[in-house]
Image (cartoon, grey):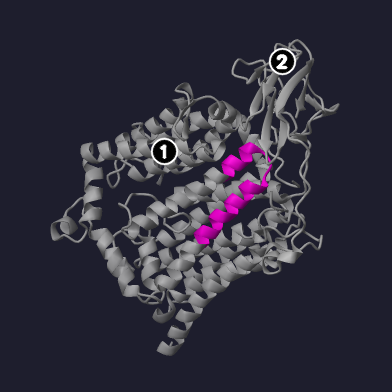
Amino acid sequence: MSQLSTTPKPRRNVELALLVLALAVGIGANMMVGVDKEKAFDSDFWFQSSLLAVAALVFHAVLRFRAKYADPVILPLVVALNGLGLAMIHRLDAPGDDTGNNQLRWTLIAMAVAIAVIWFLKDHRILRRFTFISLAASALLLILPLVPGISAGEILGARVWIRLGPMTFQPGEVAKITLAIFFAGYLSSNRDLILLAGRKIGPLQFPRFKDMGPMITAWLVSIGVLIFQRDLGSSVLFFGLFIVMIYVATSRISWVVIGVALILGGGFVASNVFSHVQLRIDGWLNAFTPEVYDRSPGGSGQIVQGLFGMANGGLVGTGLGQGRPDLVPFANSDMIIASLGEELGLIGLFAVVLMYLLFFTRGFRAALGTRDAFGKLLACGLSFAVALQCFVVIGGVTRLIPLTGLTTPFLAAGGSSLLANWIIVGLLLLISHTARAPVNTTPLPPAKDPAKAPNATGIDTPTEAVKHL
Amino acid sequence: MSDLTITALRFGFLLLLWVLIFSIVSAMRRDLMVGRKAASGAPTAREVRKNPELAEPAQPPVKQQARQLVVVEGPLKGRSLPLAASPILLGRAQEATLVLEDDYASGRHARLFPQGSRWFIEDLGSTNGTYLADQQLTRALPVEPGVPVRIGKTVIELRP
């Protein structure tokens, strides 16, 4: 095993320096969007910039206290992305619109929740006690949008929202976290069973049928989401999450083969049975055909307008506040990547994609470094979920794959997505803290009531002595 | 504001974005340096590639590899199991690779897995614990051939 330099160093000052740079990006973007309209330094600007800066610095201070060894680049990356998103949403606000301030409000709430996760959870291994509770919670969260009374009904063709007082909320976003916790908990205790039993056919070892149970369940869940909520993106996200986690847990390529076969089969059937899937695929393949372009609903006008916008931006972009990204429907949520592509150009869009890539690699680095199987799987799953979401959204906007209704993490306008992604950031920071901190082999303190947690001793089972080999 | 200023700001902002990215990458550089031996002064992989004579002499052949697992004490005394490349689950549960008929063992007691050329033992949260040469396991540890591993009343050893 190669030696990783593991001398524990908190490196919080590095984080502070990078954070200042990240805030400069976010606040600079917010200034740029209004620079030619003489509204660069209006009250909105001062209000949004100062709140974002204060929140980011508070987050940094909390890390100093609670997770001293957490990864120093995750927070600056996320703050930069969030700041860029805020600036773009602020820029796209028509006079009188309040989406920018609303997004800022959700950013602050989401950061507060992430801080609470770090402050109160302290150790991600505690989450393993909630393996099956998370499964129940995921099921509940996914069913909520279908329950009459709470459901916000069908908005834009999908039933994924619930109504909470004056706001709407997308519980599916949080479900990806609880599902990742369940998969990580389940797979870290049943990995050997799945790994050892099974028949070998050719070069692939296939698992036993009864070990397929959770796989089938995950497949049914994603198909159920597709049928009942008409949400193609989430169903791809949940299923991809499961395939990746089981592949990481067992390192058996056969799972990937089975998973891809299942999803291709499911996708083929879905594209023939469900009209909305069919429309999406048609709008992707024949985007420039006039009748497809003009069709409503399900036309390709949105994608094509986004492509025109990005083409207009070219290599260096039109400059923030200089383009017309507002011509695209949903320019500040689904199509925010196209808006950024138009105004920052290919060079700026690449920077954004690289930031996501760096975030993803930091998540995987935390997974490599941490010593417990549960933490490894959880960090892999969470960072992969963000990466897959980016791929599905950016791929959809650039017409690489059919457009689906997922949100761009940290950038797009939408509170539930921000909240869920900031919780993921909190969890990844915690995991990276245990990964980089000096080795501590003391077991977790047992649960408060030992009678209720007979398996409490099983929580802290370091798996692989990755370090010092 | 003049057009020139705005153009300058526009390119300045793109530059700022990339300055952020390069600072982040250079802050990560330490982590990306796989292969450097910390503070030992040994040559890095890159240096070795350039000057092959710097490479360390090949390590002497490792001690004989364990080829089988033998139960030396307990109800199953005398049983042996060949070691292949897959991990082994020890415990009373029926799905275990070696089903221990030992009242002091847990259902899923411990796990023996290969990594590199060595075998590691890891306790799976058993009630009575797993002992490697009289030391209770708190994390996965390598098992050398001939060192006794105690699970309940059973003692197993790896043999070449």
* Residue for point 82% across, 28% down: B147
- The magenta stretch spans which residues? A355-379
What kind of element bears circle 2?
A: loop
Horizontally, is A284 left or right of B134 in the view?
left
Q: Which mark is residue A257?
A: 1
User: Would residue A100 be visible to someone looking at this image?
Assistant: yes
Magenta span includes A442: no
* Residue for point 33% across, 42% down: A231
Near mark 2 (Cα within 10 A), the count class, few <14, some 14-19 or many ≥20, is few
* Residue for point 76% across, 13% down: B77
Q: Quadrant of residue A71?
A: bottom right
Near mark 1 (Cα within 10 A), the count class, few <14, some 14-19 or many ≥20, is few
Label 1 near label 2: C-beta < 8 Å?
A: no
Subunit bearing disc 2: B
- Depth check: B1 or B137 in front? B137
Kind of residue sitting beneath label 1: Val
Disc 2 to disc 1, how far (Cα)?
38 Å
User: Would residue A454 be visible to someone looking at this image?
Assistant: no
* Residue for point 25% across, 54% down: A284
Magenta span includes A357: yes
Subunit bearing disc 1: A
- Depth check: A213 or A258 in front? A258
Which mark's residue is nearer the viewer, 2 or 1?
Answer: 2
Q: Which mark is residue A132?
A: none
Horizontally, is A133 left or right of A100 in the view?
right
The prevailing secondary structure element of the residues shown in magenta is helix
Q: Which mark is residue B79?
A: 2
Residue A272, position as x, y percentages in the image: 21, 39
Residue A209, position as x, y percentages in the image: 44, 23
Q: Answer above or below: position of B7 versus B84.
A: below
Residue B158, position as x, y percentages in the image: 75, 27
